[in-house]
Structure formats: structure tokens, C-alpha cells
Image: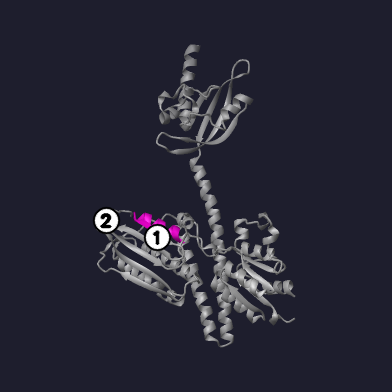
Amino acid sequence: MGNELLKIIIVDDNTDYLFTMKTFLSRNGFQVKTAPDGQTGIELIRKERPNLVMLDVMMETTFSGFEVCRQIRNDPDLKNTPIIGITGMEDELGLKFDKYDDAEYFSPDVFFDKPVDKDALLQKIKDLIL
Amino acid sequence: MSDSNNSELMDLTFKSIIDALPCYIMIQDQDYKILFANQKLKSDFGDDIISLSCYSVLKGSHHQCNVCPVRKTFKDKKVHIIEETIHLSDGTVIEMIAYSAPLFDAVGNVRACIKLLVNVGTIKDTHRELVTLGQSIALLSHDIKNILEGLQGGAYVVEEGIKDADTELSGRGWDIVKKNITEITGITQNILYSAKERKPKMKIISPVEVARQTGQLFAEKASSMGIQLLLQLNPKVPRVSLDPTGISRMLGNLLWNSLQACHTNTEKSKHIVYVRVDYYDYNHFMYEVEDNAYGMDTQIRKNLFKEFFSSKGDSGTGLGLMVVERIIRNHQGKIEVLTKPGKGSLFRIIFRLDNKKLDLN
């Protein structure tokens, strides 16, 4: 299966980031759709059944990244979807995601810190999907 | 000198020392009654506190304290140290460290306790400031990471546009780069502004002119973000004594917050931001910055000016509003925030027309 058939959904409340990351991933052979908030994101993910989800953890919107992740993991049809969490907060504020109850339900497969190393991101996407 | 004279002299010396110490010293019995109080304690709580209970004097309470070092000392004959707060008669609450030590009789029983209380309020304030500083550095670091992501991403899009001779793509990338340059400029200026207490440099200026110039600075940015920026400036508002740099920074921070809120508010297709200058009443004029973005709920509104609180989630530290609040305070002004979730927000800053008495230089 070639890259061009692989679908990625990005959920982030920073619309500029959605545009630049969509541009980058599209030009590297992925089909990319975006959502500017958690609610729209989870609806899009359920509709599109992507191969991978990129998820901003700390969104100000009604559904945080944690909630989107939890809903994905709780959905029998979606629970095995690879999730890449994007954050800039974990180290600085000492957030330890595994302190939350049912951490397995909202634990992304991997976290990337902003600014995202694009080459490392591409490699990780390939590792997770291919 | 006789032995009794020497003894009297020593007693006087010790009493002078105890009275001179900058802390509270008292001796209590097992019923918490004050048997002795040093001069500082009497000065702050009155000369008539002897025989009153410690908790009634220091806490204004009719009940024993839940945690009491004196009670522990009577029980185990050891020194105990706790943090506690006391209440002065004017309502001031002071944070103290309390030490309790036993005074033994000839057979080794605890006859009384000596209690020493030291004011640590300043230390605690400094500690809290350091904790806040640590958190704010973390949040600033997060902000700067987002900006770096924006600059890298924008630059990438520009390059791709150039490669493909796609000027629309390059233009979009360049807009993202410019927006993030504005962000980092604003953060840097706000950090510099708040780094130390800055005395405003007051001049007799036109508040309308400051608003016009600040609006012009943001006109292009607003346009590139697809937001209409309207200035409604009453030319009849007279010249007053203001710090032009501070007022411009204040308006700039509020304007930028509104533009960002509009930019991320994807539920609405048309956004307008207003900047107004007008009379508030006979003695005051006002600045207003209004948008039709998200608006704020009660919780966000309540915390708005808390240091480094931000309602912007991933995209802001609240440093800008903290600087706004400080500038308003320096001008002895007032701020009102009118907001409704889903409708938008209005920030109104009110200053006296005649603040010539405001000599802050």
C-alpha cells in the first residue's frame, strides 16, 4: 500500500499550524484532513476512519485532546488507531499523563514537542502506519 | 554591688532583651492562658492580654486551635514548630512560624510553655512569587515553542511556494511568518515591560491620537487575518496627561488579544474589532476594544487578570493582560470587562480627564 492511500487527521485549535502541517504531510504523500477543535475532530475521525491521528493535547475547545484520545480508545472500531500527541507543556508543567485514571484510554502512542522535528515525525508516522 | 542588686540588674537586662526582640514571645500555662507577654506582643494586642487565652488573643476565637504546638509540648515535653496564621485587630492576617518549648519545674514536669512567633509573611510572599515565576517561565516557554513552530512551518510553506512558483502558497506562508514575528515581538515587549516596575513617563497627549497610531500599526495585520478593524474616535476628547508608551502597549495588547480570538473563532465567518475613544462621563474618558469572537464564561472572566492566567489554552500566557492591568493601575484608571459566551467581549478602560495631580515621575 503506497503512502498516497494513507489518511491522516490533524486536530489542533491553531489554524496556522493545521495549514502548515497539512501542507507538509500532503507533499510527503499523505491524504490529510484537519479539524480545529475536539468536537469536530472526533466526528471527522469517526466518519473518515484515518490511518493515523495527530492530536494537540491542550486545546482550549470543549473537547480537549485528552477527551478526543479517550473517545478514540473507547470506540471498538477506532481504538487501535495510532495517535501522535503534539504538546509543548509536558516537561515544563510536569504533566505526567500516566497519573490520570484509565491512562491507557487516553495515552497517545507517542508525543512530539513543538516545534516538531518534521523528519522525525515522518519517520515515526511510517513506523506507526507501515 | 550586692548579689540581689546583680540579680535585679540581670532581670532588667533579660527583660530588655526580650522586649527588644522583633517577634512575639509569651509564656502559657496548660490552659493556654498567657502568663507573660513581651512588649511587641502587648503593643500589637494590648496590655490587658495577661490571663486571656492564647487563641482568643491571637485568633479571635473561642475555641482551642485544632493543631497547637503548646498542647503537644505539654504532652511530650518537647519543642514543637508549626506554621500558623494570626489575626491582628485591624483584620490583617499574618503568617507566622510558632515555636513552643517546655519550661520545667524542679522535678522535671512541664510547668509552662514558652511560645515564640516569628513573622514569615514576607518570606512566604517571596516563595509564592518564585513559584509563580517558575510556572510563568514554563508557560512562556510553551508560548515560544508555539511561535517557533509557526515560524518554521510558515517558512516551509514559503519555500514550497517558491519551488512551485505558487505565489498564493508563498503568500500564505509569509502571512504565518509575519503573524508569529508579531507574536514574539509582543511577548518580548511584554516581558521587558513587566521585568521591573516601570515608572510611567507622563506627557500631555491626545488619547485619540494614541489610539489612531496603535490602530494603524495593527491595520495590516487585521486585514491579513480577514478581520475588519474599525476606529471610532471622538475628536472632542481633550488632551490629558498619559504615558504614551504605556497606553499604546495597553491598547496593542488588547487589540492583539481580540484579533487572535477572532482568528481562532472559526464558527463565525465575519469578524469585527472596534477601537473607541470617547467620554465616559463629565470627569472621565474611556478607551474600548470590542470584538465579536468567542466571548468568555464566568470562570474565565473571574481569573482574567490573574498573573499568567490565559483563556487561550495552547496559545497564550496572559502576560499581555497582566501588563494591561499594571498600566491601568499606574494611571489610576479602571477596567470593565463585558462579555458573553458566543457573542464577544468588550474591554473598557476609564481614566480621569484631569489627572494632572498624577505625579509619578
- Label 1 sits on what residue type? Leu
Q: Secondary structure at mark 2?
A: loop
Residue A8 vs B101, above or below: the answer is below
Residue B340 relative to residue B163: left or right:
left
- Does residue B152 show up? no
At x 55%, y 80%, the residue is B158
What residue is pinned by disc 1? Answer: B338
Residue B219, quarter of the rendered image? bottom left
Return the x and y of residue B122 as percentages of the image width and height: 48, 42
Residue A72 relative to residue B69: left or right:
right
At x 52%, y 86%, the residue is B167
At x 75%, y 81%, the residue is A1
Closer to the camera, A69 or A123?
A69
Tell me where the magenta segment starts and ends, as one range: B320-336
Q: Secondary structure at mark 1?
A: strand
Residue A113, quarter of the rendered image? bottom right
How crowded is the residue under tag 2: few (<14 C-alpha within 10 Å), some, or many (20+)? Answer: few
Subunit of mark 2? B
Residue A118 vs B329, above or below: the answer is below
What residue is pinned by disc 2? Answer: B356
- Label 2 sits on what residue type? Lys
**Alpha carbon of mark 1 to alpha carbon of mark 2: how far?**
29 Å
How is the model colour-coded? one colour
At x 50%, y 77%, the residue is B175
Return the x and y of residue B309 as percentages of the image width and height: 50, 57
